[in-house]
Image (spheres, coloured by chain):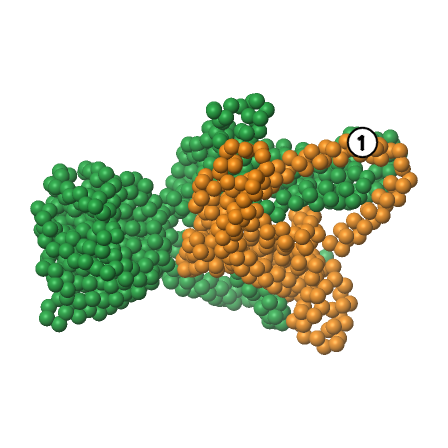
Chain colours: A orange, B green
């Protein structure tokens, strides 16, 4: 699926260039229109960025500066706000990274394994089981929220990392299996036949043939799942009460409530610090994330 | 030829009928079994016999008389409530400071209260003040002997414990190196136990002579003593509850009988006169009951941590105070029975269900074998079954490989879903009882005014969400698509998507700041334009008229990265030939957009509408992080009310019912949408 998307994109770029050359003078090429489009887009972009810019500027001010010179740039810029923000958010960020990574690894492993089995194995009841798994996409979170909470409490893992990792993993698999199965189904049968003739056992077909080929899609899955866990708020809110074990989503709220209105600058610095992990992730993985969004949309 | 065919047809019909009959029989048997099981369950789970009483924001302390007919609870707001055996309020007394410690004499006629307002208060059974004493320190714990003639007070941070007589005169006091935090006095007034921050329990006789010391694992937050002082229950910060046995005569030693580890620090303990029942209140929000051997006999979840428990000396009544602002009363016997029944039911179900399935299978096999038509069917189908079994066995590796996935999904996805549907028909006290109440929860759901305003708000959010997602992202995608400079296009596209690196919670919190009346960006901007005076700032989120619209405004100008990506991806996948054809037809600009782009983006639009509906119905963090539903009920959403019902009020049954209703609405909406989609496709 992704390959076709990629090739479609390439085709498109190529053809656009050709048409662009051959149809100069059409509406789209009108320089006045181009300027208008650019100006409109830049204006919308500026408005979109207002919260981010507001966050960055305010993060360098103290309360007095915010009150008396609201529109001025921070003078002097208070970099120590970032020390505050970092100290306040560090533990939450580390927790988020730890739990998120653990869940990502489990999801990637389980989804690729199951996706592989559903794509390439034949066994009685395969389609029924697959449809049963997909039907979980129709179950909204509000239905399972409270029973899941009770379950986690009865399992005795409330207020432990497992309360996040296990449900995240279970839920993340559904989309992962969908993604992996459709990818593995596109791999040519000959690849596997060849390996089978060489006498490779069943598991090594998965490990040595399917997995290396599916690396891009697994990266996509990993990034999507990590972003999902990093942004999760409601589930950690009800399952984790110990601040030392809390993750970024709820941590941000605790951080704010702890400082109240006394130190808006420090708060904003805390938000900015919380951006760092995703900023790094997207610097390298934006392409994969975009592919994931588009692929997910095409499947649905 | 024709005859032969008819014969085959008839034989087939007979077989089919036999199969049909037997399957019906099996189904009916299974249904009856399931129903009878459900019925026994709900009957076993019925009976709770408790009461709940809202008493301020946090119920910090509780005490109960020997027969359980006179109880007192103390609240965060400094009110001492006197209750009768059924939890009815008889009178209240304002102690002017959070009531952190309470004691009541065995006959219920004397009440000692320790107030954070640096006062000890001594009341009689009618709530009349007998005396009060002012101190230099806040008081954090109090205890009283059974006859009301000896009482103890623990001040905060003074490292002393004071013992007083009924007239309020000092009898003796002790000093410590480490701050004392808890106290208990035996009903016979012969001994006093004191727990300290350095994890010691120390026992004194009534004259103040130290009899023994016992070290526990953490600061001893609470103590309780049996009537003769032989048994002492203790709870500490290391999450443990203990039962200690102490000798008070000659040898004066102590030993730990049992310990139990809860999920958080133990804040309160209580014990009966004979030491046969111990109650424990923990920060993990549970009230636990144990027998003399340390066996857990009951467990009840309140809506907050439990800073107070009290047991009547005769072991009939248990009172608990919780941070959810309620005092709870239980009949010990019924609570234990309910817990045993619910535990038993688990085991019974685990045995009965597989057993019933076995019986059904065996029955159907027998039925098939004994019946001539069934016998033929068995011979014929048996081969198929055996082949199936062989296939399953051959594919065992496949099953093994998907087993972890299936197991996780069963535990964390399927089970909660069915549990939610089932428990929406019960009065659900997880781990304690579940009583079948039919449609009562749904009645509560439809009569809930917060939920009704929540539905209205959800509709507002969904409709405005539709408008947002159909306008700005589509416009931006079209504009980007029409840019000539590919480099510019790439950079602008990336910058528009950039805000997804900011965690959703941070975005909402930043917007909360933007809406701040005094230092918010919005008001300052309006003031800059001369549209607002900062002397009379508009509290956007605090004003019921603007609150929900302010929340709608969050995210302005609504260039959602997700929608933008979808539209843009849709546009670039439109074949170029179509654009060329449109151009040949002379369709440019708006006409091309309406006749070409829009129909080809229909798939994306439908998807965004479905997702918007599902997301809007479940909206939680947007309102929870900005207004928490307020002012009053102006910004409630259904998911927020669900959260409150479960986490604040412990109404798990009602919360499940809200979840079920939302599930049905979402499922209905999605199916409707999908059908419209296929109908539209069919027409096209």
User: In the depicted view, which residue is nearer to us: A157 or B535?
Assistant: B535
Q: Position of residue A96 (x, y in %)?
A: 53, 55
**Which residue is labeled 1 in the image?**
A33
Q: Is residue B333 left or right of residue B372?
A: left
Q: Chain of mark 1?
A: A
Q: Position of residue B182 (x, y in %)?
A: 23, 55
Camera-side residue: A105 or A182?
A105
In the rendered image, is residue B353 in sight? yes
Tally the numbered discs. Answer: 1
- Residue A114: percent from left, percent from top: 62, 62
> Which element is circle 1 on?
helix
Residue that appears at 61% across and 70% down = B397
Quarter of the rendering occupied by the N terminus of chain A = bottom right
Residue A14 x, y percent position in the rendering: 85, 48
Q: Which residue lies at the image location 54% right of the left edge and 33% below the top edge?
A: A69
Q: In this rendering, would B366 be left or right of B17?
A: left
Callout 1: few (<14), some (14-19), or many (20+) C-alpha neighbours within 10 Å? some
Q: Quadrant of residue B581?
A: top right
Look at 45% across and 59% down and name the residue there: A160
Left or right relative to B293: residue A85: right
The answer to whether B229 appears left or right of A107 in the picture is left
Residue drawn at 74 percent across, 62 percent down: A187
**Any part of residue B421 in sight:** no
Instruction: Work out whether B529 lies above or below A59.
Output: above
Q: In the picture shown, does residue B428 fall above or below B361?
A: above
Image vertical order of residue B156 relative to residue B475, above or below: below
């Amino acid at each position: 699926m992704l390959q076709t998307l990629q090739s479609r994109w390439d085709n498109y770029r190529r053809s656009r260039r050709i048409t662009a050359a051959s149809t100069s003078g059409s509406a789209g090429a009108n320089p006045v229109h181009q300027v208008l489009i650019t100006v409109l887009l830049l204006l919308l972009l500026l408005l979109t960025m207002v919260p981010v810019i507001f966050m960055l500027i305010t993060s360098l001010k103290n309360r007095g500066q915010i009150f008396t010179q609201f529109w001025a740039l921070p003078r002097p810029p208070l970099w120590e706000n970032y020390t505050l923000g970092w100290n306040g958010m560090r533990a939450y960020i580390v927790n988020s990274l730890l739990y998120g990574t653990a869940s990502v690894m489990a999801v990637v492993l389980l989804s690729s394994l199951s996706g592989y089995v559903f794509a390439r194995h034949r066994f009685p009841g395969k389609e029924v089981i697959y449809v049963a798994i997909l039907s979980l996409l129709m179950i909204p979170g509000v239905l399972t929220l409270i029973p899941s909470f009770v379950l986690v409490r009865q399992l005795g893992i409330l207020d432990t990392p497992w309360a996040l990792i296990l449900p995240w993993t279970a839920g993340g698999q559904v989309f992962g299996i969908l993604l992996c199965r459709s990818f593995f189904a596109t791999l040519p049968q000959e690849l596997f036949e060849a390996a089978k003739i060489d006498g490779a056992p069943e598991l090594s077909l998965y490990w040595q043939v399917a997995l290396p080929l599916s690396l891009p899609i697994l990266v996509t899955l990993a990034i999507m799942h990590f972003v999902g866990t990093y942004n999760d708020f409601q589930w950690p809110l009800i399952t984790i009460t110990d601040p030392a074990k809390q993750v970024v989503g709820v941590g941000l709220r605790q951080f704010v409530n702890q400082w109240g209105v006394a130190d808006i600058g420090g708060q904003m610095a805390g938000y900015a610090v919380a951006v760092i992990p995703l900023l790094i992730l997207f610097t390298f993985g934006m392409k994969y994330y975009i592919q994931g969004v588009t692929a997910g949309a095409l499947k649905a | 030829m024709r005859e032969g065919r008819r014969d085959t047809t008839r034989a087939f019909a007979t077989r089919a009928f036999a199969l049909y009959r037997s399957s019906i029989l099996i189904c009916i048997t299974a249904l009856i079994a399931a129903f009878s099981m459900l019925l026994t369950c709900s009957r076993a789970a019925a009976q709770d016999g408790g009461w709940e009483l809202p008493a301020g924001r946090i119920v910090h302390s509780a005490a109960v008389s020997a027969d359980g007919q006179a109880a007192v609870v103390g609240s965060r707001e400094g009110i001492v409530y006197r209750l009768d055996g059924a939890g009815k309020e008889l009178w209240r007394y304002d102690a002017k400071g959070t009531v952190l410690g309470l004691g009541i004499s065995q006959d219920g006629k004397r009440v000692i209260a320790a107030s954070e307002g640096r006062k000890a208060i001594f009341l009689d059974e009618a709530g009349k003040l007998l005396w009060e004493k002012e101190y230099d320190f806040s008081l954090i714990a109090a205890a009283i002997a059974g006859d009301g003639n000896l009482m103890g007070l623990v001040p905060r941070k003074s490292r002393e414990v004071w013992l007083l007589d009924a007239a309020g005169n000092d009898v003796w006091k002790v000093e410590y190196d480490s701050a004392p935090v808890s106290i208990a006095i035996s009903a016979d007034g012969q001994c006093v136990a004191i727990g300290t921050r350095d994890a010691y329990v120390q026992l004194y006789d009534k004259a103040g002579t130290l009899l023994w010391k016992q070290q526990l694992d953490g600061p001893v937050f609470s103590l309780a003593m049996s009537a003769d002082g032989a048994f002492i229950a203790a709870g500490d910060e290391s999450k443990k509850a203990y039962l200690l046995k102490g000798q008070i005569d000659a040898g004066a030693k102590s030993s730990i009988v049992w310990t139990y580890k809860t999920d958080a620090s133990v804040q309160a303990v209580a014990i009966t006169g004979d030491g046969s029942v111990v109650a424990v209140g923990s920060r993990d929000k549970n009230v636990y009951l144990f027998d003399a051997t340390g066996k857990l006999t009951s467990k009840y979840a309140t809506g907050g941590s439990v800073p107070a428990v009290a047991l009547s000396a005769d072991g009939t009544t248990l009172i608990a105070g919780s941070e959810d602002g309620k005092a709870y009363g239980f009949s010990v016997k019924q609570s234990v029975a309910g817990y045993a029944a619910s535990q038993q039911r688990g085991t019974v179900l685990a045995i009965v269900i597989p057993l019933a399935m076995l019986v059904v299978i065996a029955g159907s096999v027998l039925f098939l074998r004994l019946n001539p038509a069934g016998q033929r069917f068995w011979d014929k189908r048996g081969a198929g079954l055996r082949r199936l079994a062989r296939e399953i066995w051959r594919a065992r590796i496949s099953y093994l490989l998907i087993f972890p996935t299936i197991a996780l999904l069963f535990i964390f996805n399927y089970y909660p879903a069915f549990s939610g549907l089932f428990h929406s028909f019960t009065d659900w006290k997880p781990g304690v009882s579940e009583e079948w109440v039919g449609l009562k929860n749904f009645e509560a759901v439809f009569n809930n005014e917060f939920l009704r305003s929540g539905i209205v708000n959800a509709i507002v959010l969904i409709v405005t969400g539709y408008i947002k997602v159909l306008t700005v992202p589509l416009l931006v995608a079209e504009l980007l698509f029409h840019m000539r400079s590919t480099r510019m296009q790439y950079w602008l596209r990336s910058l528009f998507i950039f805000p997804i690196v900011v965690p959703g919670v941070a975005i909402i919190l930043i917007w909360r700041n933007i809406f701040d009346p005094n230092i918010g960006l919005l008001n300052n901007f309006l003031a800059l334009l001369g549209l607002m005076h900062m002397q009379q700032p508009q509290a956007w989120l605090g004003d019921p008229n603007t609150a929900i619209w302010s929340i709608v405004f969050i995210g302005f100008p609504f260039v959602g990265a997700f929608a933008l990506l979808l539209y843009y991806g849709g546009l670039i996948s439109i074949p170029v030939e179509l654009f060329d054809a449109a151009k040949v037809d002379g369709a440019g600009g708006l006409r091309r957009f309406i006749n070409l782009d829009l129909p080809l983006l229909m798939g994306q639009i439908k998807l965004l509408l479905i997702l918007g509906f599902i997301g809007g119905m479940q909206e939680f963090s947007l309102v929870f992080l900005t207004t928490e539903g307020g002012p009053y009920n102006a910004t409630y959403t259904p998911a927020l009310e669900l959260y409150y019902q479960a986490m604040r009020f412990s109404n798990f049954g009602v919360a499940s019912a809200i979840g079920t209703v939302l599930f049905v609405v979402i499922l209905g909406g999605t199916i409707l949408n999908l059908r419209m989609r296929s109908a539209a496709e069919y027409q096209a």
